[in-house]
Amino acid sequence: MAKNASDKSYDVAIIGAGIVGCSTAFYLARRGIRVAVFDRGPIAGEQSSRAWGFIRKQGRHPAEIPLAAEASLLWDEITEEFGFDSTRRVKSGILMPAETTEDEALVEASYLDAQKHNLTSEILDSKRLTQKLPELSGNWRCALYTPDDGHGDPEASTRTFARAAQAAGAELFSDQAVTGFIRVNGRVSGIRTERGEQYCDKVVVASGIGSRKFLTKLGYNLPIQIIRSSVGRTSTTKPFTEIAMWAPTTAYRPRPDGSFIIGNGYRNAGTNYDLTLEAFTNLRYFLPALRQNQGLLRLGLGQDTIRSFKDLLPGIGKYKPLPEPATNLRKVKQNFAEFRALFPHISDLVLVESWAGRIDLTPDLIPVIDRLPGNWNVLAACGFSGHGFALGPIVGKQVSQWIIDGTPSLDLTRFKCSRFADGDFELIKAA
């Protein structure tokens, strides 16, 4: 990856080299736009390499389903163009089984949303669930299953988009933090990095957990909070399924080598929320969501609490990559134990790795994809709330259309920046 920006100007500068930033660069460069991507760390260095890897339409906020459906088609195109190893995309289906009547109600609600959008989702009774995955243990009432959902490799996919963007003419500058913006006559006309100034016509802010800080510099308060989710990886075993699962008390994604990525279940997520100064700034937006999702978030003080105070101090160090987030090893072990209970026949599996990832959370748990009010040549694509990996390619394509054609091909009204200040957003149970 390139390390130093040149003195030439660009049509578009993108802040953030994750799946959204790199896919945006790819679709822009493929249409002849001069584009550069800047990141304070390596490509896919923070959030995009830490995702579960689900590529799903089921179980989403209804506003996201049209995006997810289009994204699924793009995942097919990218995998076909660049080969299986470019994304490791598997269309195996994803199971969401229900154990209790409350679980069943959640499954049925997700199924109704799927029907409204003509998805291939179906509800399997306990007999059909056993036929679909005979190795699965437990007493299940039913399961939601979408056969053309599946999973992929987050880091490999992001790097594929980065390489493809470069091949199409984009320039990528890793380990080069953006520190601010250049304004000419009140208009954003470029960015400042720790190595100098870079002029451009438009800016895309796609830096995940860092996005709020950049938008604040432009005078816009976007309510985004940072939470922390912990994940584990198992040793390998003889592969017996490609189907991924989001169960009540655990989740997993099979990998081609026979290992599994293990995450949180939908009933007991146990995600960590380190209170920061930003948390109090936008508390009024998040209180309803916190009440509605009690038990899914664990409030506390941690390294991000300290970081939020350090950010008040002057110095360029604040733009460097954040330290490795602390892993909630107790929660990872609990999720692994629940996974082992699902498949007792693979008792030889052990945990071999664990990590945590930060998530940029919005009050309604869906992203912001919009021009910035008052700065119409700045577009924000952030706040994906832990389920943005699958949406990355379609968001990149929509942003590129917005820049080149003047409008995206899909209706993105539900993702507008102003919905929080206007009170025009809907709370749902975390997904």
Image (cartoon, rainbow, N blue to C red):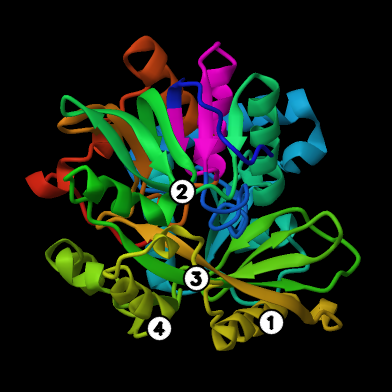
- Residue, disc 2: 194
Task: Give the residue type at disc 4.
Answer: Gly
Residue 20, position in %: x, y? 50, 39
Residue located farthest toward the bottom when viewing the structure as drawn: 330
Mark 2 and mark 1 in contact? Answer it, CB < 8 Å.
Answer: no
Relative placement, left or right, of 410 versus 242 is left
Q: Secondary structure at mark 4?
A: loop
Which of pointers 1 and 4 lies earlier in the amino acid sequence? 4
Q: Is residue 36 magenta?
A: yes
> How much space separates mark 1 and mark 3, taking CA atoms?
22 Å
Q: Is residue 71 among what the camera can see?
A: no
Residue 299 placement (x, y as % from top left): 33, 82
Residue ID for mark 1: 341
Q: Is residue 206 above or below residue 250?
A: above
Pointers 1 and 4 in contact (C-beta within 8 Å): no
Determine the residue located farthest toward the left in the rendered image.
422
Side (left or right) of 74 relative to 134: left
Closer to the chain start, of discs 1 and 3, is 3
Q: Is residue 425 above or below residue 117?
A: below
Q: Residue 151 magenta-drawn?
A: no
Instruction: Check the picture and name the quadrant holding the N terminus.
Output: top right
Q: Can residue 34 be spotted in the picture?
A: yes
Between label 1 and label 3, give the one nearer the viewer: 3
Residue 17: x and y in percent read 54, 43
Which residue in the structure is indicated by mark 3? Answer: 229
In the image, the segment drawn in magenta is 13-38
What kind of element bears circle 3? Answer: strand
Of the two numbered discs 4 and 2 in the rendering, the one whose residue sits closer to the viewer: 2
Mark 2 or mark 3: which comes first in sequence? 2
